[in-house]
Image (cartoon, rainbow, N blue to C red):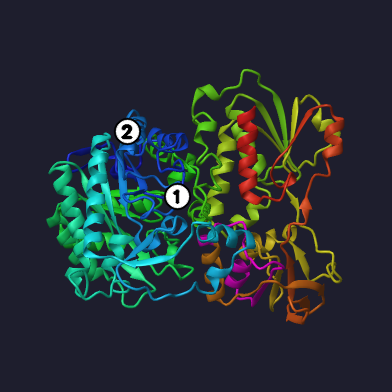
């Protein structure tokens, strides 16, 4: 029985009946074919979430003008009748699982990168005030810089800023109405008009970008006109009873002047009068600010947009349903519905991490929901002009490559006795997956606790703690046998058909003078300190290595009142994180007082300092009482010779294979279990 009666209660948007209150939030996926038609990958991607129990699947960023109003070639489009067939097939694939399908209709306006790539005009309300990216936004690797600049580097690329004429605005309004009519003809259950996030309709709403003094700008009513005219036109085209609603900003961050909550409340009343059946309350930020995404529509703070939804609800009373969104865990979502702050919750990242989340909540097994770990590979990939993906769930955007996780068809016809050496994330994830397929699995580790170095990181990162608890729970519910506190030896290998090496990486001391000093610690030395059993000596801490592990340790040390400096040899901290996550971590650490030194190479460690060289070869002396090495040196696969001698089939996964961190660990575990 579900512990979430409000989330699991049926709901209604206009005449659209929904089986529960969980919607798949609209997210750009960049999975369409290169002409904007629906691809087979999209069919699998959305069907998995429909099968998983979401009540309504909202396909994000469906272009009503293509290429001129699109972000990329592989953005879903519905600007011609030729695109209807693919949308109709998608509707059938979603609806056959009891879910409903909606399309979020969008015109990119000033953010239409595909218009630039194809040399089309970039439609704007007024001449832009160029504001380059802030310092943190420039913490990109050369490969990332190249990927982000791709739309500007094609032979056809041209930046043609075009101030929209009234005729062009009416053409844009017609494009929305025509796309909505096509959606209805395709059997889609409803449409969401994207009136937020800096796209065309919102660029006219914002006093920061709309400085016109004609009938489309100058006052709040005139700035809102384009959005409201669009709503009225769509309503006229699809009829009075077809479900249609609007996503809009409750506020703009990091801008002056900006959209305010008062503006949002005023707009909400007018949207209802114009004919919307629901209000989807979001937020936006100046895109030049690195933390803008995680301050606004993809918040890092749990429940960051709930207060705005509640304010809109209080203002409009019960006129239409409210959809809330933004980093909502189960309890926050249930409470939002229970208190009346919202009527529906839209979940994005969590449904990428586990498409079966709604079904698991319905069935009373929330502890079996694979958690989002908020490392932002999903939206980070969109920044890099590639398709959506997920670190926590390697099958995101690859759903067609494997059967559903809970399907009995996963059982192998040839069960094997499999020994997994290593109880870190790769080993644990492989263990329960292989056991669920009918293999006889044993997990062995020299340590007495599960989790490997993930257990250390989990002490300072609540999202990784949830992932560790999930993995341990999955293994405990499987038939896998555990052998802990037992280093692997040749006799342990006897009787196994296959041995999986999942021993992680060697995070030993760096090969520099002083690395063996007593004031130098490695990750393996830190568990007693991280768990609070021991204290580090008073004084500054220097961390060698600016990956996610190093930044996690920096946050932990700073929270215990140490002065902290992180030294990173490359120009990028936390390279393994998606860009918004990386920017968030850097900004938060710097705000807490941590010093981050990129492109510095440690050359020696002394009793009271670390010596480093910057890119110019200048010597930098950094005072410290403790130095911590957080650099993975090499895969730990010293047992391979013994394994090959055993005669068993040998597999190597996770960091023992290559230094791919969590992403590689989960990908390898899934790939191995799917293959077997």
Residue 656 visible at all = yes
Judge whether residue 471 is colored magenta: no
Tell me the quarter of the image containing the N terminus.
top left
Q: How far across and how far down the image is residue 630, in percent?
A: 71, 62
Q: Residue at x 27, y 37 (%)?
A: 188
> How far apart, in angstroms, are the residues tagged by discs 2 and 1?
25 Å
Q: Residue 523 appears in which quarter of the rendering? A: bottom right
Front residue (pair 138, 487): 138
Q: Residue at x 82, y 73 (%)?
A: 604
Q: Residue at x 33, y 37 (%)?
A: 82
Tell me the quarter of the image containing the C terminus.
top right
Indicate the secondary structure of the residue bearing disc 1.
Answer: helix
In the displayed structure, would residue 618 be above or below residue 584? Answer: below
Furthest residue toward front? 155
In the displayed structure, would residue 153 be above or below residue 82? Answer: below
Front residue (pair 22, 164): 164
Question: Where residue 622 is drawn, which disc sits there?
Answer: none
Q: Earlier in the sequence, mark 2 or mark 1?
A: 2
**Left or right: 638, with 26 as reference point:** right
Q: Which residue is the site of mark 1? A: 349
Q: Residue at x 36, y 34 (%)?
A: 86
Q: How many callouts does the rendering have?
A: 2
Indicate the secondary structure of the residue bearing disc 2.
Answer: helix
Q: How far across and how far down the image is residue 411, in percent?
A: 57, 22
Q: Which residue is the site of mark 2? A: 88
Q: How far across and how far down the image is residue 119, in percent?
A: 43, 58
What span is colored magenta in the figure? 554-581
Front residue (pair 613, 541): 613
Q: Residue 88 appears in which quarter of the rendering? A: top left
**Left or right: 312, with 95 as reference point:** left
Judge whether residue 564 is colored magenta: yes
In the displayed structure, would residue 81 be above or below residue 453? Answer: above
């Amino acid at each position: 029985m579900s512990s979430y009666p409000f989330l699991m209660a049926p709901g209604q948007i206009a005449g659209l009946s929904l089986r529960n209150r969980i919607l798949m939030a609209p997210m750009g996926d960049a999975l369409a074919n290169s002409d904007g038609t629906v691809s087979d990958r999209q069919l699998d991607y959305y069907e998995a979430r429909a099968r998983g129990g979401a009540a309504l699947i909202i396909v994000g960023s469906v272009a009503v003008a293509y290429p001129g109003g699109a972000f990329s070639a592989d953005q879903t489009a519905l600007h011609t009748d030729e695109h209807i067939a693919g949308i109709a097939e998608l509707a059938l694939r979603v609806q056959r699982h009891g879910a409903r399908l909606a399309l979020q209709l969008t015109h990119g306006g000033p953010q239409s990168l595909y218009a630039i790539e194809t040399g089309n005009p970039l439609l704007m309300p007024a001449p832009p005030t160029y504001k380059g990216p802030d310092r943190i936004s420039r913490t990109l690797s050369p490969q990332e810089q190249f990927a982000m600049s791709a739309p500007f580097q094609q032979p056809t690329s041209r930046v043609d800023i075009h101030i929209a004429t009234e005729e062009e605005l009416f053409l844009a309004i017609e494009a929305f109405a025509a796309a909505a009519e096509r959606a209805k003809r395709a059997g889609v259950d409803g449409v969401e008009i994207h009136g937020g996030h800096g796209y065309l309709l919102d660029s006219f709403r914002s006093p920061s970008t709309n400085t016109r003094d004609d009938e489309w700008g100058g006052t709040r009513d005139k700035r809102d006109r384009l959005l409201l005219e669009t709503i009225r036109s769509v309503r006229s085209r699809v009829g009075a009873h077809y479900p249609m609603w609007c996503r809009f900003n409750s506020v703009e961050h990091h801008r002056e002047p900006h959209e305010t909550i008062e503006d949002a409340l005023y707009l909400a009343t007018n949207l209802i009068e114009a004919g919307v059946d629901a209000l989807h309350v979001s937020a936006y930020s100046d895109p030049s600010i690195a933390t803008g995404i995680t301050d606004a529509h993809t918040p890092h703070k749990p429940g960051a947009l709930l207060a705005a939804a509640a304010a809109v609800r209080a203002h409009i009373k019960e006129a239409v349903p409210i959809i809330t969104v933004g980093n909502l865990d189960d309890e926050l979502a249930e409470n939002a519905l229970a208190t009346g702050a919202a009527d529906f919750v839209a979940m994005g990242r969590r449904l990428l991490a586990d498409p079966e989340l709604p079904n698991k909540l319905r069935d009373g097994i929330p502890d079996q929901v694979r958690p989002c770990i908020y490392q932002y590979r999903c939206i980070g990939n969109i920044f890099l002009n590639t398709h959506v993906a997920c670190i926590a769930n390697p099958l995101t955007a690859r759903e067609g490559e494997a059967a559903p996780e809970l399907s009995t068809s996963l059982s192998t016809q040839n069960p094997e006795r499999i020994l997994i050496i290593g109880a870190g994330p790769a080993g644990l994830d492989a263990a329960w997956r292989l056991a669920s397929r009918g293999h006889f699995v044993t997990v062995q580790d020299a340590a007495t606790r599960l989790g490997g170095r993930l257990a250390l990181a989990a002490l300072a990162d609540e999202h990784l703690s949830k992932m560790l608890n999930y993995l341990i729970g999955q293994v405990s519910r499987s038939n896998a046998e555990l052998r802990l506190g037992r280093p692997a030896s040749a006799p342990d290998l006897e009787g196994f058909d296959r041995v999986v090496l999942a021993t992680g990486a060697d995070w030993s001391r760096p090969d520099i003078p002083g690395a063996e000093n007593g004031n130098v610690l490695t990750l393996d030395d830190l568990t007693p300190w991280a768990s609070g059993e021991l204290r580090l000596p008073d004084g500054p801490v220097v961390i060698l290595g600016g990956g996610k592990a190093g930044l996690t340790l920096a946050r932990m040390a700073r929270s215990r009142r140490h002065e902290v400096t992180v030294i990173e040899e490359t120009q990028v901290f936390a390279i393994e994180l998606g860009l918004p996550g990386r920017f968030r971590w850097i900004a938060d650490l710097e705000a807490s007082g941590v010093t981050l030194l990129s492109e510095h190479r440690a050359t020696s460690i002394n009793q009271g300092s670390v010596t480093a060289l910057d890119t110019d070869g200048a010597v930098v002396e950094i005072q410290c009482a403790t130095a911590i090495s957080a650099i993975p040196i090499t895969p730990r696969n010293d047992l391979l010779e013994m394994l090959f001698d055993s005669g068993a089939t040998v597999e190597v996964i996770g960091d023992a294979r290559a230094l791919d961190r969590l992403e590689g660990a989960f990908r390898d575990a899934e790939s191995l279990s799917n293959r077997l």
